Amino acid sequence: MLLMRLIRPVARASVLLCAFAVLLGAGGSAFAGLGQPTPWQMGFQQSAAPTMDDIVWFHNFVLWIIVAITAFVLALLVIVMVKFNARANPTPSRTTHNTLLEVAWTVIPVVILVVIAIPSFRILFVQLNIPQADLTIKATGNQWNWTYTYPDDKVEFPSIMLTDAERTKLNPPPPRLLAVDNPIYVPVNKVVRVQVIGSDVIHAFAVPSFGVKIDAIPGRLNETWFKATREGVYYGQCSELCGKDHAFMPIEVRVVSEQAYATWLADAKKKHSVEGAPANAVAASQ
Ligand SMILES: [Cu+2]
């Protein structure tokens, strides 16, 4: 059986490559930091939200498929080069059609695509279908900082990156190019709806640990959501090239207990209160 003889080394190579991928994946997640990147990080930042758990799972799932396909194609190429070169195979076969093979190489890729599409669409739906929100935050991208509004609490404040001089005054110094003067605070295990808009050009609001990334477009209110399940400090960045200081408008989210959130909110209401409801605000209860 020529087919069986061809398939066996392919299967062996696939197993080896899969084992390599596992090592790579495991090493990557071991190095990944919570809420911020770490030196030599290979994989995603650690997940702190159910949506990101889904994304990490889907990424690993597709990685297996890619590794298997790549190993298979590589093995086929090597077999063809070794067994069927002009020296090894001076009188080539004149076969042009093999119905079984042709049906297989049409149907199998279709099946693989369907297997990828089903969980992919499910995750897309979870991301875009915003559940009943406990809290709404509006993030407005400006050149080059963010303005955050808590419409239900009539709180609004700008959030600007800390300079190196400002950072080094703090103990311990927060990460470079990520820490800001006024972070967003959210309570842990609550559904946070984020409304995102641009005030001048297109920006993008992205926090890797929450699996959130959505464009901030002038004149269009985009929405996304996250539910942070672990307390901590989470950093993100503007993820759309928006001008010369694109790299200097980070996002800092502090996930805290409900009491700590209430304390922060009371303080924020004193410092950053705005008269009346801010423009475009939509109450979380709606
Ligand atoms: Cu930007």
Image (cartoon, rainbow, N blue to C red):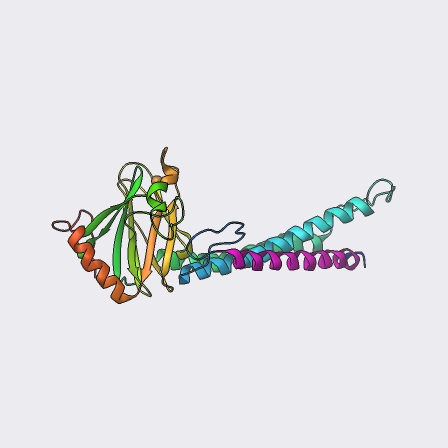
How far across and down, in percent of the image, does residue 70 sit? Answer: 65, 50
Of residues 43 and 259, the one nearer the viewer is: 259
Residue at the location (34% across, 50% down)? 170
Q: Is residue 244 above or below residue 123?
A: above
Is the magenta region chiefly helix, strand or loop? Answer: helix
Residue 236: say if magenta: no
Looking at the rendering, the stretch of residues picked out in magenta corresponds to: 4-32
Of residues 179 and 237, the one nearer the viewer is: 179
Ligand 1 falls in which quarter?
top left
Q: Look at the image and tell me whether residue 138 can be seen.
A: yes
Residue at the location (79% across, 58% down)? 5
Q: In which quarter of the image is residue 17?
A: bottom right
Q: In this view, does 205 lie above or below 242?
A: below
Of residues 17 and 230, the one nearer the viewer is: 230
Residue 29: say if magenta: yes
How far across and down, in percent of the image, does residue 251 sit? Answer: 34, 48
Q: In which quarter of the image is residue 20?
A: bottom right
Q: Look at the image and tell me whether residue 213 can be seen.
A: no
Quadrant where the C terminus lies? bottom left
